[in-house]
Amino acid sequence: MLTTSLSKQHHLAVPLPRSCDTFVFVGATCQETSGTLFGKNSDRPSDENHEVIRIPSCVHYDKGNSVECTFISIPQAQETLDCILSKPCWMWGCEMGANSFGVVGGNEAVSTLLADELLSPDDGSPTKRLLGMDLLRLSLERGKSSKHALDICIELLEEYGQGGPCCKEDSDWTYENSFLFADAKEAYVLETAGISHWAWERINAGEYRNISNGISIRSNWGALSKDIQSICKENGWWDGTAKFDWKRAVGAGGRAHSSLEACGREASGKVHLETLAAKSKTLQSPPNARWYVEQMALILRDEDSGICFRDLTGFCSTGSQISWLPKSSDVDDHSHFFTAASDPILAKYKRFTFADTIRSDEDDHGSNELWNIWRSIALQKLRLTGDTLDMLASIENDALAELDIQRKNTQNKSLSFAGTVRKEIDLLQKK
């Protein structure tokens, strides 16, 4: 994630991250049915444990209940949904995840000219509100469609605001957020500025989109927060007559320059999605779901562009998720793949579905143990044997094979997500 350009330089205690990317391709044509392809790498401090937990659905009968987020408490919803979340262990919120209604989401850090709103006027420290990761988890726990999740995120943003320390080891590091919510039919990008300003853009069937730590919505917004245009006009960031360009206004103060166009990882990610969409149309027959997931895995493992980031002391890809949401299918057939480890190049994607048995509240599926094993391997710079690498590859291959429609309704019961995590742990402990 990318930190904001704050006038107070407290955040420099943590090295600047160079990566965090989220992708979606809505209505991807497939042999079985069209679907939505989603992917995200979470880039955080390399020594920050990342876990994959399941939060069972719950009806909260007491209307006075509250939910303890990372820094503040807010009223609990009457109903919360079954969720799978990939998150830093220390915080309540999540970097990415999915719910049992077929909604997926991820968040990224962004920086705007309103970033100083996040700081206390007294000492310049971040004021504790809802973290962007809290907003994402709340939206996934409550949203029954991507639009519903978007609306919930906006409502909470406007009521409670965003902000607070975004790193356990540095209480002064903070940032604004962007989000990508998707379901099998459509997706939405939501970008924020300051405490509670926002803009959103819809992604329709047949379209694709990526976000990469920067403001990206231009004049194609679907809606804006109430006062943002007047604020931008008062500050001289918008003339009040031209079509309102969200990025040019809150990101560049109304100035037109080359950085308004996609560059760096954002540009690379856009090319990846363009290539994927074009390739899917040139194959002799429509690709299957497995092909799409494999293509997203290649994108998330692209180290040359910085989409996959590996660093022992700075920031690295501490977690990774790929989701395939078929349009005409039961939600139990939605597939979510997580590395549950800090290196998506070596660690393998393991499949989760909501058909998995719920073992306990906030079950981490062994992901903390696996994350620490991979971290130890990286710190010791251990080289895995060819046999070990082959066996690891078979774990991912078996997970991907579950997508093959021919294997449905067979008597060969696949391992649960927790079972696959345990299989990878056992393999690495025997290396």
Image (cartoon, grey):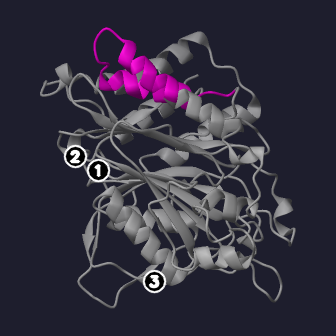
The answer to which of marks 3 and 1 sits earlier in the sequence is: 3
Question: Would you say residue 414 sits in the magenta stretch?
Answer: no
In the image: residue 133, left or right of residue 34: right
Q: Which residue is mark 3?
A: 74
Label 3 vs label 1: CA separation? 25 Å
Q: Mark 1 vs mark 2: which is more N-terminal?
A: 1
> Residue 93's spot in the image, x, y percent?
51, 64
Question: Would you place residue 424 above or below residue 61 in this image?
Answer: above
Which amino acid does the dot numbered 2 rest on?
Answer: Val
Residue at 71%, 54% in the rendered image: 2
On screen, 409 above or below 111?
above
Q: Are marks 1 and 2 in contact (CB under 8 Å)?
A: yes
Relative height, residue 38 to residue 249 (above, below) = above
Q: Nearer the viewer, mark 3 or mark 1?
A: 1
Q: Amino acid at mark 1?
A: Gly
Q: Name the quadrant containing residue 107.
A: bottom right
358 w.r.t. 161: above or below: above
Residue 405 appears left or right of 245: left
Q: Give residue 180's position: percent from left, percent from top.
A: 47, 53
Front position in the image: 420 or 227: 227
Outermost top residue: 284
Residue under numbered circle 2:
331
Residue 126 x, y percent position in the rendering: 73, 76
Q: Magenta part of the protein: which range?
A: 274-303
Question: Disc 3 on helix, strand or loop?
Answer: strand
Q: SS class of the residue under badge 2?
A: helix
The residue sitting at the front extreme is: 241
- Answer yes or no: is residue 301 visible: yes
Q: Position of residue 387 (x, y in %)?
A: 54, 11
